Amino acid sequence: MTDDVLVVHGGTPLQGQIRVRGAKNLVSKAMVAALLGETPSRLYDVPRIRDVEVVRGLLELHGVKVSDGADDGEIVMDPTNVESASTDEINVHAGSSRIPILLCGPLLHRLGRAFIPDLGGCHIGPRPIDFHIQALREFGAVVDKAPEGMHLSAPNGLKGAKLELPYPSVGATEQVLLTAVRAEGVTELRNAAIEPEIIDLICVLQKMGGIITVHTDRVIEIQGVPKLHGYAHRPIPDRIEAASWAAAALATKGEIEVLGARQADMMTFLNVFRSIGGEFEVTDDRVGRPGVTGAEGGIKFWHPGGDLKPVALETDVHPGFMTDWQQPLVVALTQARGLSIMHETVYEQRLGYTDALNQMGATIQVYRDCLGGTPCRFGRRNFKHSAVIAGPSKLHAADLVIPDLRAGFAHLIAALAAEGTSRVYGVNLINRGYEDFEGKLAALGAHVERL
């Protein structure tokens, strides 16, 4: 498809100001939560991205009336007339998102039945749904496997359960929260994920009438309630997109102010950014001061000049260094003087994008060993999940094919930092998680065009 190719004329520092909206990883889940209410819900600052369109389509298939609110980025979801959707209709969305499995708990509560199509999403590792299914069974769901997917029912309703995750998975934690909040009795979830997006989802469910306690040591307790009402919520800003633009500023030796970015959600990233040699200023503190224009602050990121410094990093669950931050940052690390190490401990197949960077002149070697820190669950297995990046490397233009969402943005940053003209294929995949990225690139002075 020629309309899926972006021509990037690299070598120009990105400079200017862009804005991030609500976090992709919260907004889609908050939209699913609207199914649980008996009155309409209102969500603000919703980004115009493909994942939101997919969830909106799924909600509408199930009888939820979704409309745009008065403000830009506001949507209203009325679940009064929730109904079953046909298997064929749901299958239209199979392969485009992993969200359908999260609809199971809410639909079982509302209708007593649900259907899971074959799931898609980015190809960065298997991400099995075994725990999702097992958890739903623990709540009392009956699961029937069929060629087209899985049919679920709850003949005796859903009841609270004691659960423990083998790994603090974000998706599995979301599944338990969305199911337990209306299950009869108390649910205890151990080894839960505690990412900022998870806490924000808990805030949404609490607004709806849920009773959820976050204890120490990754324990979440949910006291089921018989019914919930709608909510009005402004989501936390997208910390992944904010960090992606920060990495772009560093890789292109530019300066980007990311309006809406929030320091509290990005502290781990900001520490690493500063350790590498990048500079940042939290600008929300300036809002309202005399002589300062604009009603919104954020974080300004820039390359101060001179050499960047290498680092040894491991991705990890929150509060560790986020796995979705590593791909854009590795592009910046190709410009650091010395050897950097990136040990990926969350997804076992997330370093394949480095092949394209090597074709552009980077020097990156991937290994099966756990490098740079403690052994992880992928150690002694046949996964290349550690990378050594030698720099600085002069990047040159190339033809790039985007493999997944975050790697795609990393490839885009590499093309912007490289000398010459690159062609980036499959660029529409970036629309899954980055709102109007082409408009933002234009605002930052990038020279890009559709083929």
Image (cartoon, rainbow, N blue to C red):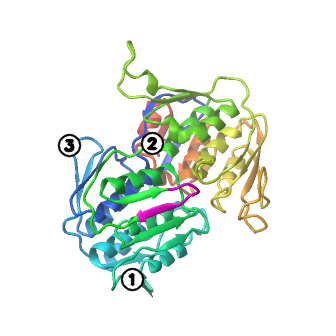
In the drawing, does residue 18 fall left or right of residue 333?
left
What amino acid is at disc 1? His
Residue 3 in view in this figure: no
Per the rendering, the mark at residue 70 is: 3
Label 1 sits on residue: 151
Q: Mark 3 vs mark 1: which is more N-terminal? A: 3
Q: Residue at left 34%, top 58%?
A: 31
Whether tag 3 and tag 2 are in contact, CB under 8 A, the answer is: no
Q: Mark 1 vs mark 2: which is more N-terminal? A: 1
Picture layout, residue 62 above or below residue 41: below
Whether tag 3 and tag 1 are in contact, CB under 8 A, the answer is: no
Q: Mark 3 and mark 2: span between their CA atoms?
A: 24 Å
User: Where does the image place residue 195, in percent across and percent down from the top left?
Assistant: 52, 52
Picture layout, residue 313 above or below residue 175: above
Label 2 sits on residue: 437
Q: Secondary structure at mark 2?
A: helix
Q: Quadrant of residue 40?
A: bottom left
User: Where does the image place residue 364, in percent across and percent down from the top left?
Assistant: 75, 48
Alpha-carbon neighbours of circle 2 within 10 Å: few (<14), some, or many (≥20)? some
Specify the segment rendered in magenta: 215-222
Alpha-carbon neighbours of circle 3 within 10 Å: few (<14), some, or many (≥20)? few
Q: Nearer the viewer, mark 3 or mark 2?
A: 3
